[in-house]
Amino acid sequence: MNRIAAKYVYPLTGTEPLVNGFVERDDEGTVIRTGVCTDPSAEPFFLDGALAPGFVNAHCHLELSYMKGLFRKGTGMAGFIDQINALRDTQTMEQKTRALEEAMDILWNRGVVATADISNGSDSFALKKGHPMYTRTFLEVFGTEPEDCEGVMEGVRRLKEEADRFGIDAAPTPHACYTMSPQLLTAASREGLACGFLSYHSEESEEEEEMLRHGSGRMWENRKAAGMSVPPVTGTSSLLYFLDRLREGVPFPVEGHVLLVHECCMDQEGIDAVKAALLHPFVALCPLSNLFIHNTLPPVPLMRRNGLKICVGTDSLSSNDDLDIVAELYCLQRNFPEVPLGELLVWASRNGAEFLSCTELGTLEEGKRPGLVFIDNLDAAGRLTASSQSRRL
């Protein structure tokens, strides 16, 4: 048995910490109990900071780790997509694999125990099979031309078969409204939900909204200039369009776990529609990526008022300077100071574990093996600072 104490222990069964608390675990990392120290000075291992369950990175593109430092910031989504297309295959497989391995190890050492990862190919499968960090792989689907729908789906089914041979959890998922024909958006959603999970880029930017509402803007013009079909102009939000396409493929209300990633343009109408359509909706915030690409943030106060289950992701190193959950939390705290640290940690751990149905993770409860992360350099009020970092214990 090992026992570790700290100024703050966050079991995350609620949002309040145990002040001068402790965690006891067995040699396999299973939690035996938590509690409050009777004499903190007598504890053999007392840390000046916070202890919490291991993090769950709810949205990442590990395959793009080789793109670190290559992108210009502040280009908007259209400019970012142009850079992705220009830089996607500019390095060797050896370089890509090395970057992948480094990124996974960084996440693990900083306390991430599970990741919802987006993949467009099989580059990461062998690493995921042998790595201690759990990953659920979302095999992202693209295709703007309706006649290509079945061919694209056949390709992603073959990719899933390859993932199955490696023994990793994987299933198709749609990318976003602007990269898919209506038929493909429905087909990929139906197939992904057959496995119980969906991760979908939704309302990431005003440019996306302008496409669907008005049939105009930089993303619309880029697609037209490239000779690609564009999504239908609905006059409503891209989130409502997604739900309409989902209804074409699966019974409502949807029973699977659906993760809406980004949601920078979410409004009350969209939230009401989500609650009516989805039994288990989650939202993944990637604030540093949003600032990197188009210098905006999602409407966190609106999401909180409506009781949405918020998760936290890092997105990729193409749209972020680092893969650091604590940095994402500090960004959220700085911009939304009304959110207490305990709630931020629920987003970074418990809610992500619930989305992935990882029942052993997310809380420091007896019998669970959630991992243990230490966060240092808190301020006098127990809040994150710019110097706060995390490490696995």
Image (cartoon, helix red, strand yellow):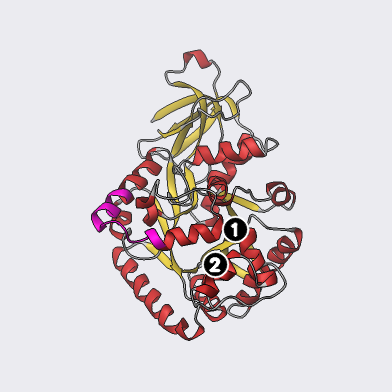
Residue sitting at x 34%, y 43%? 105
Mark pair 1, 2: CA separation: 9 Å
Quadrant of residue 160 within the rendered picture: bottom left
Query: Mark 1 belongs to which amino acid?
Result: Glu
Residue sitting at x 43%, y 59%? 84
Label annotation for residue 220: none
Which secondary structure is most common in the magenta stretch? Answer: helix
1 or 69, nearer to the observer: 69
Name the residue furthest bottom: 147
Is residue 124 covered in magenta? no
Q: Earlier in the sequence, mark 1 or mark 2?
A: 2
Residue tagged by mark 2? Answer: 176
Disc 1 is placed on an element classified as loop
Is residue 93 covered in magenta? yes
370 or 338, nearer to the observer: 338
The vertical placement of 36 against 233, above or below, is above
Residue 43 location in percent, x, y? 46, 18
Query: Do the numbered discs 1 and 2 sit on residues whose CB atoms are within 8 Å?
Result: yes
Residue tagged by mark 1? Answer: 204
Q: The magenta stretch spans which residues?
A: 86-99
